[in-house]
Amino acid sequence: MHVPLSDKVAIVTGAAHRVGKAIAVELARAGVHLLITFNASPEDVVKATVRDLKSEGVDAYAVRADLSTVAGVTSVFETLQEHFERLDILVNSASNFQKRTLLEVTLEEWRQTLDINLTAPFLTTQQAIRLMQTQTPAGGVIINIGDKGSQKPWVEYAHHSISKSALLTLTKITAAAYGPAIRANAIIPGLVMKPDGMDEMRWQNYGAGTPSKRPGTPEDIGRAVVYLASEDYITGAVINIDGGESVV
């Protein structure tokens, strides 16, 4: 069944810019009110994002938080209760992306990456489930943003790949344990955000190697989030939004 999203409430983590912002904007266009989180992003960037969200006719707020800590996650949910008093959609988008082979990873880097990519979604998922279970009506949806390193070992990004693989398992456990009221799904983006410093021709050439013959955009991920949030029979799914890259 299709679920109308107008006047629903969402948290999108790591949403000050890039893919996280695109997800928040697409939800706002669907009528969803938003609480976005950020950590290191400049205040002017965050304020501009909030303005963009509000321009879609919804309420939007931002909160700075270290989501790898219980205190940080608690502050986010306290802000949520202050402004909205409910939660219908949680999108775990915040991520740390660091290039290291397994033997290059230091213990500090390992902990930092797992803290952001796995511990933070674990903590927000716990809080979201507890809140969603007490609402009237009970329920909601959790959407985790992974990447291709979660499905195929990415040896040059060892700790990142490991953390994202575990995030997929968190998604599936959530779906299996808390349905039907609470759904959980994961999205695996493909070539949707050109790396800093890469020239446009090289980027287009990468996209030409996929069945779609072009790179995607962050908005493709945002629309996929809206779809997963609005279709109530989809849970436990892992969806590749990659122009077919995963099948070649």
Image (spheres, grey):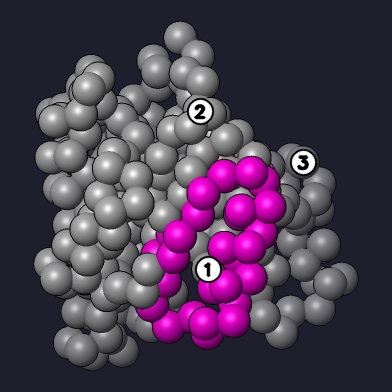
Task: Estimate the x, y position of residue 53 in percent, counting from the top left.
Answer: 61, 54
Instruction: Name the spot of residue 225 as percent of width and height, x first.
Output: 51, 39
| Closer-to-camera residue (33/197) | 33
The front one of 172 and 23 is 23
Q: Judge from the rendering whether residue 229 lies leftward or rightward of residue 175; answer left or right.
A: right
**How many residues crowd around disc 3 within 10 Å: few (fewer than 14), some, or many (20 or more)?**
few
Residue 5: mark in rendering? 2
Q: Is residue 232 above or below residue 185?
A: above
> Which residue is located at x 46 percent, y 49 percent?
34
Element class at badge 2? loop
Identify which residue is drawn at 84% across, 72% down: 200
The tag earlier along the polypeptide, 1 or 3, is: 1
Q: Is residue 245 visible?
A: no
Q: Quadrant of residue 159?
A: bottom left
| Amino acid type, label 1 | Ala
Residue at figure coordinates x 25%, y 20% from the top left: 137
Mark 1–mark 3 Cα distance, whole angstroms, equals 29 Å
Horizontal side of residue 124 vs 31, given as left or right: left
**From this viewpoint, is residue 217 visible?**
yes
Q: Is residue 210 magenta?
A: no
Nearer-N-terminus badge (3/2): 2
Checking the image for residue 16, the label placed there is 1
Give the residue at x 31% y 65%. 117
26 is higher (above) or lower (below) than 202: above
Identify the magenta region.
Answer: 36-62
Give the percent coordinates (x, y) of residue 12.
42, 54
Q: Secondary structure at mark 3?
A: loop
Residue 212: assigned label: 3
User: Of the residues shown, which amino acid type is indicated by label 3?
Assistant: Ser
Question: What's the CA distance linking mark 3 and mark 2?
Answer: 29 Å
